[in-house]
Image (cartoon, helix red, strand yellow):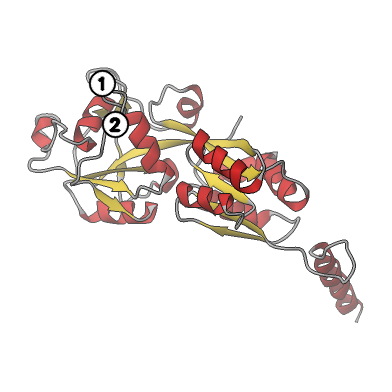
Amino acid sequence: MKRTAFLSLITAAATASLCSCGGGGEEKKTIKVSGSNTMAQVAAAWAENFTGGKVSVAGGGSGIGINELTEGRIDICTSSRPMKQEEKDKIKAKQGKETVEFVVGYDALAVFVNPENPLAQISMEQLKDMYVENGAITTWEQVGPGGLTGNIEALGRENTSGTYEFIHDVVLGKNAAGEKNRFRTTVAAQSSSTAIINNLATMKSAIGYDGMAFKTDKVKWVPVSKKTGEPAVMPGVDDARNGKYPLARKLYLYTAGEPTGEVKAFIDFAMSPEGQKLLSKTGYVSLQ
C-alpha cells in the first residue's frame, strides 16, 4: 500500500508539472518543434529526455519549419541552414517579432556511395560538375580511371530541405551574373534522409549527400577535397568544428521573439551538457 501511495504521488507531481500556473488547472500546451529532417533524430532525443513539459517533433524540411514558424503554428523551428533575411523579415511582418537564432551544434554533410563503388575521394569541383545544370561530369569514367563505368545517377534532396539549400549555396554556387546556379534536371530528388540511404544501398552507380548522422553499413562515405588533386578529408568531429572539412555546417533552432517559459527551458536543455551529449550520441557534432 505504501508503494502504491508513493507511485500515486509521483504521478500527481508529474501531472502538476504539465499544468499551467493559472486558474482552472489547464494543462500546458505542447511545445511544438518542426523543420529539418537532418535534425529530426536529435530533436526527438531532446524531446524524449526533456523533463520540463510535453514536446512534439515533426520533420518536413527546414523550409517547412520556417514557414510553420512564420505562421505561428510551432514554437521552435529546427534548421540545417541559416535563415535568410527575407524569411526573418516575413516573420517580423507577420507576427511583429524579431527572429531569434540559436546555434546548437554542427553537422558534416557527407557524400555517400554504394559500398561496391571503388570511388576513393571526390573534390568540391567534381561534385559541382555532377550536380549543376550543364555540368561536365555525367559518367564515372570522367571521375577517375579504374572505377565504375557508365552514367552517374545523382540523388539529391527536395527543395524544402536545408540540406538541399546547403548544397545549392556551397557546392553549386553562383554564375558570373551573381545568380544561383541550378541543379541539373536529372538529379533525383529524395523526400528524406532515409530514402537517400536506402536507394544508395541498391544503386551501385548512384551518388548522394546527407548528414553524417545517417551513415549506416548500407553505404560508404567518400572523402572530400576542396580542389581536385588536393588531399581529401573524411567527415569528422574535429574537422567539422575547425572548417577543414569543406561540407561542414551549423545546426540551428529559431524562435519568433525571445523564448520564455517551457520553450526557453527546452532550448536551454538542448544547449546544456546533457543536451549536447545527446547531440553527439545521435551522430552530430557538439558545440565543444
Q: Picture coordinates of residue 195 (x, y %)?
A: 33, 56
**Residue nearest the viewer, comparing 98 with 286:** 98
Helix, strand or loop at disc 2? helix
Q: Picture coordinates of residue 197 (x, y %)?
A: 32, 52
Residue 247 in sight from this viewpoint: yes
Q: For the residues labelled 2 and 1, say whether their Cβ atoms are less than 8 Å apart.
A: no
Give the vertical position of 117 relative to 28 (above or below): above
Q: Amino acid at mark 2?
A: Leu
Give the quadrant of the N terminus: bottom right
Q: Residue furthest front?
A: 93
Q: Amino acid at mark 1?
A: Ala
**Residue nearest the viewer, comparing 59 with 121:** 59
Q: Which corner quadrant of the image does residue 90 belong to?
A: top right
**Residue nearest the viewer, comparing 176 with 31:** 176
Give the vertical position of 78 relative to 83 (above or below): below
Q: Picture coordinates of residue 269 (x, y %)?
A: 70, 45
Residue at mark 2:
172
Q: Which mark is residue 203?
A: none
Left or right placement of residue 201 versus residue 32 in this view = left
Left or right placement of residue 141 versus residue 78 in this view = left
Give the quadrant of the C terminus: top right
Residue at mark 1:
176
- Residue plotted at (38% across, 51% down): 193
* Mark 1: few/some/many CA within 10 Å (<14, 14-19, 20+): few
- Residue plotted at (75% across, 52% down): 262
* Mark 2: few/some/many CA within 10 Å (<14, 14-19, 20+): many
Give the vertical position of 53 relative to 174 (above or below): below
Helix, strand or loop at disc 1? loop
